[in-house]
Image (spheres, helix red, strand yellow):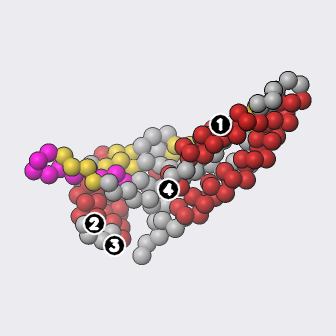
Amino acid sequence: MFFYLGVVMKDKEGVTRVGCIWYDNSQTELLHRLGAVKDGVVQYTIQGEDLTNEDLGNIIRKAKRNWPEPWKTATQYALESRNFLGTPIKEYYPERLIKGRIALIGDAAHVPAPITASGFNDSLIDAVVLGECVRSGIEGNKAIEALSDYEDQRLGKVQRMVQSGMSFSRSFGRDR
């Protein structure tokens, strides 16, 4: 699970949104304690008011240590004003894509970390490949053969995509 921090800052002209995202894999325990994640399943996105003063203080101190300017000021402002979202991010590494006459595609089959920026594209590729595999029909054993062909073509690729995101994500959250 990772902590996502989206920052919103107000200026003299109105509201300016700052595209600041903080992937922090050290917040798993916090997300579980708040109930945002239960039994490995994301339940909801936390908001500023969900944090205790102690939890907020810990995150602010970490932000001060880890962020350079101008992001440090923006992050500190969002945290202190409790104007942020903390979104748990779950990844799913598939062991299989088919079972009998059922195939999973897209997010039902594999969920990469957003950092990969490939989930939507790979979901479309799943659909195209599955369509090509069943093009000649699905009567009788043809369905099982077509779905096996789909899994043969896609499983290794989506596993590598998810594993790549997981590996990259593990590098976030380390205190410097």
Mark 3 nearby-residue class (10 Å; few <14, some 14–19, many ≥20): few
Mark 2 nearby-residue class (10 Å; few <14, some 14–19, many ≥20): some
| Magenta residues (range) | 5-14
Q: Residue at x 47, y 44 (%)?
A: 36
Q: CA distance from mark 2 to mark 1?
A: 42 Å
Q: Are marks 3 and 4 in contact (CB under 8 Å)?
A: no
- Circle 1: residue type: Ala
Q: CA distance from mark 3 to mark 4?
A: 23 Å
Q: Residue at x 81, y 29 (%)?
A: 136
Q: Helix, strand, or loop for circle 3?
A: helix
Q: Main secondary structure of the magenta part?
A: strand
Q: Can you identify the residue that label 4 sits on?
A: 115
Name the disc covering residue 65, or none. Answer: 3
Q: Can you identify the residue that label 1 sits on?
A: 127
Where residue 115 appears, as percent x and y from the top left, is: 50, 56
- Circle 2: residue type: Lys
Which of marks 1 and 4 precedes in the sequence? 4
Q: CA distance from mark 2 to mark 3?
A: 9 Å
